[in-house]
Amino acid sequence: MQRLKERGDNSTLVVASAGNTARAFAQLASLTGQQLALFVPEKALHRMWITTDNSESSPVNLICVNGDYADSISIAEKVQLLPGFTPEGGARNIARRDGMGTVMLDAALATGRIPDHYFQAVGSGTGGISAWEASMRLIGDGRFGSMPPRLHLAQNIPNAPIYYAWTGKEPSPAMPEMFDDVLFNRRPPYAIPGGVKDALDATNGRVYGITDDEASKAKRLFEKSEGIDILNAPGVAVAALVKALQSGTIGHEEVILLNVTGGGISRLKEDFSLSVMKCDVSVSSAEEAVEFLEGR
């Protein structure tokens, strides 16, 4: 958004999301006036709220896709080719990856070194790629160590394409419901150059398959220990950390970075009134989305 503003580009930014990223973009767009087209699966609508006024003059168009996250991406990719629209870019956007990588940079500044291990629950795996790239920059800096952290990525089985691809296990049939559906992307950037597989190979990484029950127990453990609520997705990451400790994969004295990718919503509701975003149009194809946006 900042780059578009600096360039004087008045185009509409196109974002596909399973809900959480869309909410962040909607929050900023409502504050800055940036025109935004959000493509979100219909079942993710419950995540679409912001803390600012959601009036009729909002610059945000919330387009509900009759499908999953991959369908939202597919439709958005066709819309963003139109004149007057700019793609956010997803995993291919270096700014997106640099933004996610600040978690690693902040941890290095706080501890004075690169962590030994990095844990995160992933859908597309972009967070893991970002952590790896950020650690390589820290190594290049020379003040924080010479070894990247070992990546420990977690997915919610059976909806876990990265887990099955990495472990070589036979995929189980996907389930319509899962502990957190933001962790399911049917087409993650796994085998592309610089993708998830390369990041795992470079760091001797691991991928964990976490059940709903394991994630639920880990989520309660974190909230009891730290005194703050977290979302379901980071509960999956906590469960992977528990598994790694129990199996002896990591030592109790090693430096571990656990990326809690969302939380504090119960706390937030005590301090802010949430404005629920309404779907502007429901679509099943790119043609329907184009027709709506061209008729705005």
Image (spheres, rainbow, N blue to C red):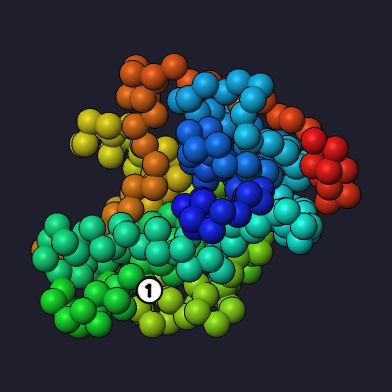
In the depicted view, which residue is nearer to us: 199 or 59? 59
Query: In this orientation, does residue 197 appear?
Result: yes
For disc 1, the marked residue is 133
Q: Is residue 69 above or below residue 255?
A: above
Residue at position x 31%, y 78% from top?
136
Residue 48 rendering spot, x and y as whole percentages: 57, 32
Is disc 1 surrounded by few (<14), some (14 to 19) or many (20+) residues within 10 Å? some
Image quadrant where one finds the C terminus: top right
Q: How many marks?
A: 1
226 with respect to 42 (left or right): left
Residue 197 rendering spot, x and y as whole percentages: 50, 77
- Could you tell me the amino acid type at mark 1? Glu
Residue 205 figure quarter: bottom left
In the depicted view, which residue is nearer to us: 233 or 242? 233
Q: Is residue 142 above or below residue 167?
A: below
Q: Is residue 288 above or below residue 154?
A: above
Identify the element where label 1 is drawn. helix
